[in-house]
Image: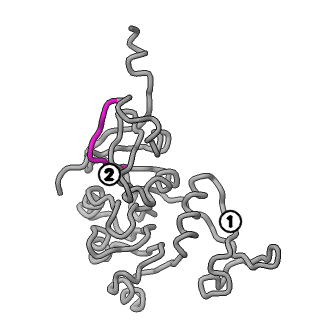
Amino acid sequence: MHSELENPIKTNVQFLSVDEAIKQIPKSATMLVGGFGATGVPEYLLQGVIDRAELQDLTIISNNITKETNLNVLFQQGRIKKAIGSYFTTNKEVVQAYRDGRIEIELLPQGTFSEAIRLGGSGVPAFYTPTAAGTELAIGKETRTFKGREYVLEQTIFADVAIIKAYKADKAGNLIYRKSARNFNPIMAMAADLTIVEVGEIVEIGELDPESIVTPFAFVDIVVQREEL
């Protein structure tokens, strides 16, 4: 058999240590972080961000900043300048920091939040949604009426970096997820200039069921195999 047939998939995905991967993140980055509550949060990569002290004034785009996660550690260290997401009221200290002017918060309804990320990864700059029409969340935003219903124009989301968590990767960089840990991770992989993935296991090409692959390697830049924290 010809050697080119033994490994027919050639990609630009890099397989790096956590330190090597985190060095690729620019200072003051806008960063998508996967997770829903504490599920699907890339804790290992976030620990790498914590360990790189020069990463300051971060804009974090994540569903929430749950106390049980390393995102809360970054918040406690004062390294998050702005947070964009849906459920920051789950952390009363974040709410108080906002009231004190120590952190900026941009709230988006969860459906709007997920669609903004998905469309940002698809190259769409903005979209209309009826969600939040007539509420304080629509103040300052363009609105239009379609078929007698008011809609709000929302900007889509595209970040400098996405750090996400997957279950397994193959050596091409294709990803599968485990149950509800899938949450925001797949759409975030599409919506950043640099996508860094933490996985529990890296397998040979062909070992993943093609029908189970959720994120193809085209959306992945760096894969890091998780070690025990």
Q: Nearer the viewer, residue 46 or 89?
A: 89
Residue 199 inside the magenta-drawn segment: yes
Which residue is denoted by mark 2 in the rendering?
A: 23
Which residue is denoted by mark 1 in the rendering?
A: 127
Above or below, 218 relative to 82: above
Q: Do the residues under discs 2 and 1 have CB atoms within 8 angstroms? A: no
Where does the magenta region start and end? Answer: 197-204
Q: Looking at numbered disc 1 in the image, what kind of residue is underneath it?
A: Phe
Magenta segment's dominant SS is: strand
Above or below, 39 relative to 211: below
Q: Looking at numbered disc 2 in the image, what kind of residue is underneath it?
A: Lys
Residue at the (35%, 60%) spot, across then down: 40
Q: Secondary structure at mark 1?
A: strand
Above or below, 197 relative to 104: above
Q: Nearer the viewer, residue 24 or 218?
A: 218
Give how far across and how far down residue 171 sits, in percent: 35, 33
